[in-house]
Amino acid sequence: MDTPGRGRPEDLSSKEVENALGYPNYRRLWINNLIYMFVSNGQRFAIGWLVLDGLGGNETRQGMAVFMLGIPVAFIVMQAGVLADRVDRRSLLISSQSGLLLVVFATLILLGLNQLTYPWVLFLCVLSGVAQAFGHPVRQALIPLLVPEHLLMNAVALNALAMTSSMILSAPLVKIAGDLFDFEGVFGLQLVLLVVGLFVLRRLETPPVTKSPKRRLIQEAASAFRHVVNDLRLRVLFLLLAVASISVNAAVMVTMQAKVKEELQRDSGDMAYLLGVMAVGIAITSVFVMRKGDMKRKGGKFQRAMMCGSALVIGMGQVSSFGVLLILFFLMGLAGGFFITMNQGLIQSATPRDLMGRVMGLYLLVQFGLMPIGALGLGWAATAVGAGNVVSVCGAVALLIVSWTHLGFSTIRNLD
């Protein structure tokens, strides 16, 4: 339970505050999320770098390490969402981040002793993934609890801005730390940031947890699934999230890399430039939504953004110029910024506060759990018909489905 006497952290009824960062507890969460996502994104890059260059591994070993880092989300995130509705959320955040800090510290010790072997890397990747999986749902679930409803889109957009900023900055700064201080500097930087993040959490206050009869974790998770299925708004929003994850996201984030190498005859590492300009586009629209968050008919705007993004993916699959791809990826980022912020914001607006952690667990499971499945299927299809054609088909399927929901469900189109 929450600390006795800890009520609602702040008065959220005031209309005078125009930005979610004006609420101290949201500001503390945002700063911690920025640090946490920087470490999370930087760690994915650092692990691949360590395996390939530090341990002399190949691409298969690198892929396995990154897989071990991400797979705990699929198995734990729903249970973590249940805990986010049951226990003190501040304590859960601190425990998750402390666990990640211990994993990074253990990595540093093994590096210092020259004992960090590939099996140790895989083991530490699993532990790191577990620690992060327990922290993800509560980070998302806290956002609508720390700001008033009219600033929810503003708060979600700010969180997306933190995410994209970390995507843009983490790899270059980790590379600089590694060039200056070897891999000890890479993980030392992460350790320092996690300590700073824990210091920020020390003053965070969270709303009390609503008392409810305790049931098994599987029953609690099932209650979130039933709620989503029984609510038309959530059902359609989750459908579009699933479509984006298994088709568009898998095509853009994974299959496009094969197209760059096989059809454009470039180094697959050049995909980093495409992802970089896409992240810039996401950041730009995140700032726009942050400033104009209290818009009318957000549902229709969200659907139109997905239509634009899907149409861009169709084009990505067919172009043969890397320069044109850079432009398309930037435009995809602009559309993606709307999709990310509005989909999450609309889902949170339609979710009861006492179910927020569980629904956010389901949200993260769909968002991150379906993409590897999609990537696996698209990889098989790409060997048969070509990577570019597979990418275009994914865009066409997504465009067809989102257009159907836009025309067929006025309730979603008119969501505020």
Image (cartoon, grey):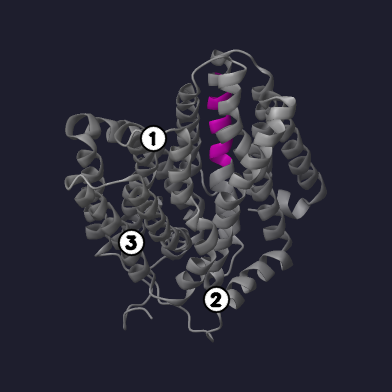
Q: Is 332 within the magenta?
A: yes
- Image location of residue 265, percent across then percent down: 56, 14
* Image quarter hosting the N terminus: bottom left
User: Which label lies toward us, 1 or 2?
Assistant: 1
Amino acid at pointer 3 = Asn
Task: Mark yes or no: residue 296 visible.
Answer: no
* Viewer-nearest residue: 399 or 55: 55
Q: Is 205 within the magenta?
A: no
What numbered label is drawn on residue 191?
Answer: none
- The residue depicted at 31 percent of the width and 79 percent of the height is 3
Circle 3/circle 2 CB separation < 8 Å: no
Number of other residues with Cα within 10 Å of mark 2, as a class: few under 14, some 14 to 19, many 20 or more: some
Of helix, strand and loop, which one carries label 2?
helix
Residue to which mark 1 is pinned:
57
- Secondary structure mostly seen in the magenta stretch: helix
What numbered label is drawn on residue 25?
Answer: 3
Task: Tell me how far mark 1 sits from mark 2, CA to CA.
Answer: 39 Å
**Magenta highlight range:** 327-338
- The residue depicted at 22 percent of the width and 53 percent of the height is 196
Farthest right residue in view = 408
